Amino acid sequence: MRPSPIISAIGTGALALGMSIAVAPSAGATTLPAEPTTDDVAATMEEALERDFGLTPFEAEELLEAQDAAIDIDAEAAEAAGDSYGGSVFDADTLELTVHVTDAAAAEQVEAAGAEAAVVDHGHETLAGVVEELDAAGGADGVVSWYPDVENDTVVVQANDTDAAQSLIDSAGVDTAAVEVEQTNETPELYADIVGGDAYTMGGGRCSIGFAVTDGSGNEGFVTAGHCGTVGTSAESEDGTGSGVFEESIFPGNDAAFVAATDNWDATNLVNTYDGDNQTVGGSDEAPIGSAICRSGSTTGWECGTIEARGESVSYPEGTVEDMTRTDACAEPGDSGGSFIAGDQAQGMTSGGSGSCSGGGTTYYQEVAPVLDTWGLDLVTS
């Protein structure tokens, strides 16, 4: 039975969260990454943002501090708005959080919480309902994805063929006033079928660790992409010293898995930044749309981008997956399963996408928090 539609990222990717296996960038490495100091940890994402966003050290620090504050403000504003809460968007340029409400009367409470308020017609729940109706219609050849565009209060259907998109909309019977068709040349694919790199292997394939977790009995393991293995599939660390087995796995529809360590695989709270340093994981609070985010992957290393949308349904050749998060952080085949993180807050595991790190592209990830909730797992944070 499939968990609630939380899990939808299809990944490929890198050993992002350090375990006692090969986590260093070079192939064949067998030592744990060095424990970073607090100052080193703070600098890792800041330095990546300086590089990828063209920020000064002060601007990078200011951005991360503003995002941390926005997470707290968003939670308070959502509670204040109640049923009128329509989603939120963080602007990385102005460092402002805008919270949408479907009732003008709730705007004052939202602003009292410290956010800008905007009154919208639909809101995220209505948009999510449209996405579910499109999901039920089953997709169509030539249609790439559909997602709630919270910022513009509409559902965007991306397609190579706009006639196919219109056919999907008609068959779903959704409110056309809430839908916008966008033509794209993207063709999403999975990133999981490259052998080699410093991740974990399963048979002749290779995927990557997302985040270290423990289950309800205290057993250690990690979350990763479901398309990397079915229940019962054996997994092995890159150096061959650690082993595990897939105890939970879902794909397609959702795309997530839990691999339980069975021998010599010790969990840490580290993400490999591929520069000789590491980022620690402190929790899994969800960053607002518009937030800066960084990704760790064994093919392309440590790359950053922006959260563009949540709740996107993506049509892969292997099947449609729901509730994906869309980013413009680049990735390439071999990056599957790697960590997406904002500050020290775990966000998700690298999925599939389009494009490359030489030309840019779109990458999707599986939100980690709902995966933890669904399977009763705890993120390792110390």
Image (cartoon, grey):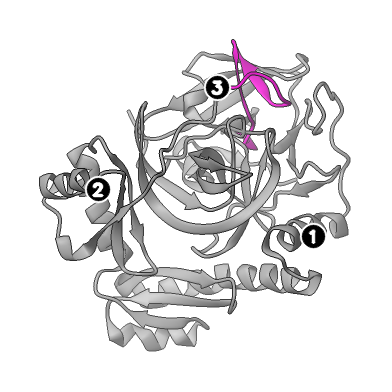
Whole-percent x, y for residue 186 in the image: 41, 43
Circle 2: element type: helix
Q: Secondary structure at mark 3?
A: loop
The N terminus sits in image quarter: top left
What whole-number distance in Å separates the C-alpha atoms at marks 3 and 2? 30 Å
Give the residue displayed 56% in from the left and 67% down from the top.
71
Instruction: Tell me which amino acid carries mark 1.
Output: Ala
Q: Which residue lies at the image location 79% right of the left edge and 26% below the top edge?
A: 22
Q: Residues within 10 Å of mark 2 (few under 14, many from 20)?
A: many
Q: Quadrant of the C terminus?
A: top right
Q: Where is 287 relative to 325, above or below?
A: below
Return the mark for residue 193.
Answer: 3
Does the segment drawn in magenta span residue 195? Answer: yes
Residue picked out by circle 2: 132
Q: Residue at x 71, y 74 (%)?
A: 62
> Tag 2: residue type?
Glu
Q: Residue furthest top?
A: 203
Residue position for label 1: 42
What crowding class fits label 3: few (fewer than 14 Cα within 10 Å), some (14-19), or many (20 or more)? some
Cα distance between the residues tagged 1 and 2: 39 Å
In this view of the protein, which residue sits in the foreground, 304 or 119?
Answer: 304
Q: Is residue 215 visible?
A: no
Q: Nearer the viewer, residue 180 or 162?
A: 162
Q: Total of numbered circles in the picture? A: 3
How far apart marks 1 and 3 lie (CA) works out to: 33 Å
Quarter of the image for residue 33 reads top right
Extent of the magenta region: 194-214
